[in-house]
């Protein structure tokens, strides 16, 4: 199943890139593997996937220990400050920085562990009460403050668009966050680049690509529906 799903996802990515006049190399596919057992990740790895995304620190750490070391792990879920220390030197990119206090903790732990940590600022571009992330209006202030902290580097923005039946309904949000990214990039802030735009999931990644996504987060489209009742050995 994973092989067939990856083939379909890849075909759809390439088609979206063609429509947008973009090169396929501009888009990174992150396989969102939350709740999925290690053998499924191993299958995806076998077929070339090296970027995996997890929502929970505990689960990511458990998988980190048993899977190949050339995997790039993306922390895409809401991150509690008391869990930050476990990610040091292991998370390739933290997508979900949504407050200065969290950025400060990532910085402090990065200094303590003598590592450099790349982060994205999570923006709730649609203003949904049920979602984490800061408003578009607050983004510039947080980007500037986070960039001034030691041992962390602001690499771009992330958003989770609304869950919709028609992916076209999210085009406006993808356009807004791309415009926000461009506006911030033009300000030439030290220790900030806006090269990464993490947006688009299984239901809308093609529209996200057409609107400039550099990283798309696809879980169900690769691994199938999730089983939230599966028990694991995640103990952090």
Image (tube, grey):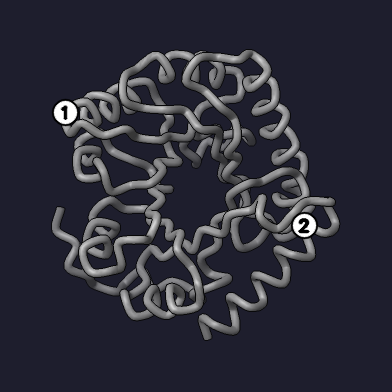
Residue at 54 percent of width and 83 percent of height: 3
Q: Is residue 15 left or right of residue 47?
A: right
Where 176 sits versus 17, above or below?
A: above
Residue at 70 percent of width and 63 percent of height: 13
**Mark earlier in primary sequence (2, 1):** 2
Where 54 sits versus 233, above or below?
A: above
Q: Quadrant of residue 65?
A: bottom left
Between marks 2 and 1, how big is the CA–CA gap? 41 Å
Residue at 73 percent of width and 28 percent of height: 179
Figure disc tally: 2
Give whichever of 162, 188 is nearer the camera. 188
Where's residue 167, x and y in %? 74, 56
Where's residue 48, x and y in %? 50, 72
Q: From the image, tell me which residue sits under label 1.
A: 112
Q: Secondary structure at mark 1?
A: helix
Q: Quadrant of residue 197?
A: top right
Q: Which mark is residue 214?
A: none
Image marks 2 and 1: residues in contact by CB distance under 8 Å: no
Residue at 58 percent of width and 54 percent of height: 28
Where's residue 1, x and y in %? 53, 86
Q: Secondary structure at mark 2?
A: helix
Give whichever of 215, 176 is nearer the camera. 215
Give whichever of 96, 165 is nearer the camera. 96
Q: From the image, tell me which residue sits under label 2.
A: 17
Where 133 sits versus 100, above or below?
A: below
């Amino acid at each position: 199943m994973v092989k067939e799903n990856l083939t379909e996802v890849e075909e759809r990515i390439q088609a979206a890139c063609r429509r947008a006049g973009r090169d396929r190399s501009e888009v990174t596919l992150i396989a969102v593997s939350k709740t999925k057992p290690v053998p499924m990740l191993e299958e995806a790895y076998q077929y070339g996937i090296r970027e995996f995304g997890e929502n929970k620190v505990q689960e990511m750490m458990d998988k980190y220990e048993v899977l190949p070391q050339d995997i790039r792990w993306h922390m895409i879920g809401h991150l509690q400050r008391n869990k930050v220390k476990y990610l040091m030197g292991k998370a390739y990119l933290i997508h979900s920085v949504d407050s200065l206090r969290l950025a400060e903790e990532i910085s402090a732990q990065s200094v303590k562990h003598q590592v450099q940590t790349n982060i994205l600022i999570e923006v709730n571009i649609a203003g949904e009460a049920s979602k984490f992330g800061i408003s578009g209006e607050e983004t510039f202030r947080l980007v500037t403050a986070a960039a001034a902290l030691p041992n962390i580097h602001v690499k771009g923005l992330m958003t989770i668009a609304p869950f919709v039946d028609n992916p076209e309904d999210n085009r406006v949000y993808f356009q807004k966050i791309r415009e926000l990214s461009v506006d911030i990039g033009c300000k030439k802030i030290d220790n900030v680049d806006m090269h990464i735009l993490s947006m688009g999931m299984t239901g809308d990644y093609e529209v996200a690509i057409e609107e400039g996504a550099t990283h798309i987060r696809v879980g169900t489209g690769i691994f199938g529906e999730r089983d939230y009742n599966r028990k694991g050995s995640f103990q952090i």
